[in-house]
Amino acid sequence: MRYEVPQLRPRTLALGALLALLTVGPLQAYVPQAPGGVRARGLNSPSRLGDSTTASQAAPVVTAALGGVGPLSGVVSLAAGQSHCLAARSDGGVLAWGSGLDGRLGDGSGVDRPTPVSVASVGGGGTLTNVVAVSAGASHSLALRADGTVVAWGLNDHGQLGDGTTLSRSAPVQVLGVGGTGVLNSVVAVWAGASHSVALRSDGSVVAWGYNADGELGNNATADGLSPVQVQGSTGSGALTGVLSLSAGGSHTVALRSDGRVLSWGLNTDGQLGNNSTASSGTPARVRAVGGAGFLINVASVAAGGCHSLALLKDGTANCWGANGSGQLGNGAAVSQSTPV
C-alpha cells in the first residue's frame, strides 16, 4: 500500500544560504537561529526535533549538535521528512535524526536517534563527505555531492533510491545513471517526494526514479523506475529541457522553465497539476493561468506540497492550486482548485 503525504513536503535550501527560509516537514518546522544554527518545533515522536526529548513543542527549541552537546551549527541545507530530518554541514558532512525505520537516517543502524548522528559513507563505514544539499522523502533520503553525483538511503520498496534494486538501505548507495548504466552525474539539485525522487541536471533536463503508478516519473509510463529515467517533453516525446528549478510534492512534480512557464506531472486527484483537470498525467503539462484561460507565465519560483502547488510570480504575487481542505491555497476558501488562484 502506498503512503500518501497529506501535508507540505520538505524543501531544500541552497548551498551557502543562511537559512533565511523556513524548512517544513509534514509534522515539524525548522527556523533559523543564527547563520547555520537550527531551531525546531512541532510533533516530536520519535525525537524528530533533535532536542534529545520526545515532547512535542509549540515554540521553537534548539536542535542539538552531533553527540547531543550544544546547539547544531554550520548547517547549509536542511530537509524534513515524515519522521526524520537531515542537515548538510559546511564541512560537507550530513547529520540525521528522528526515526531510523527502514534505514532512513543512513547511519547503518536502523535505530531511532533523539539527537543528530553522522550519515555513513557509501556502503557504510566512515562518514559521508562532500555533500552540498539534502532532501528527505516520506521514508528515504537524498544527498547531492559537490561532484554532481547523488547518493540515497532508506526505504526502497519502489526503487526510490535509484540503485537498480528494491532493497532498503541503512547506509548510502550511489544513484545509477539513466537506464541503470554508470553513475548519475551533472546534477545541480535533488528533491525527494513521498516515494519518488527527482533530479535537475546542469543542462536543464530532469530525471526521476521510484514510484510511478500515477506518472510521477514523467516518462509517459506507469512502471516504477529502479534507476533514473528521462522526464519527457510536454508532447510525450523527447526530453524536457530548459528547466531552471523544480519541486517534488507527495506524488507530483512542478518545474519552472527558463522562459517563465510552469509544467507539472504526476498525481492530480486534487488538481495539484494546475492544468484544469483532475486526471493524473505521465508527461509534463503546462499549468494554466488564473481562471483557466491561457497559461501561467512570468514565474520566479515554484514549490510543491503534498497535494498542492505554489508559484511566486516575478511581480511578487503568489498563485496556488490543488488541495485546499485546510486552506492551504490562501484564497479564503476551503475548496480544491484545478487552476491557480
Image: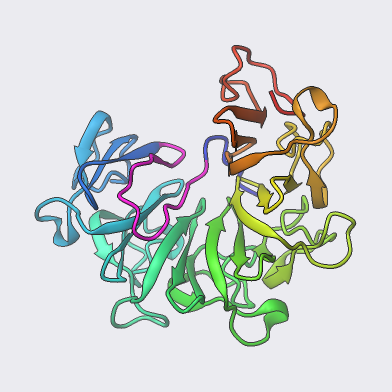
Helix, strand or loop: magenta stretch:
loop
Rendered location of residue 47, percent (x, y): 28, 46
Rendered location of residue 71, percent (x, y): 14, 50
- Does the magenta portion include 89? no
Most extreme residue toward the top, as rendered? 332
Q: Quadrant of residue 119?
A: bottom left
Q: Which residue is drawn at 36% across and 79% down?
A: 121
Q: Residue at x 57, y 20 (%)?
A: 330
Task: Reply above or below: 173 against 182.
Answer: above
- Does the magenta portion include 24? yes
Rendered location of residue 248, percent (x, y): 60, 50
Q: Which residue is drawn at 46% across and 38% down?
A: 26
Q: Closer to the camera, 130 or 64? A: 130
Most extreme residue toward the front, as rendered? 315
Please report the bounds of the magenta region as a residue range.
9-27
Left or right, residue 239 beside residue 85: right
Q: Residue at x 84, y 32 (%)?
A: 294
Left or right, residue 308 beside residue 296: left
Q: Quadrant of residue 124?
A: bottom left
Task: Reply above or below: 311 against 173.
Answer: above
Can residue 266 be seen from the camera position used here?
A: no
Left or right, residue 124 beside residue 244: left
Rendered location of residue 274, percent (x, y): 75, 35
Q: Closer to the camera, 31 or 167? A: 31
Q: Can you say which quadrant of the picture contains the C terminus?
A: top right
Can residue 260 be seen from the camera position used here?
A: yes
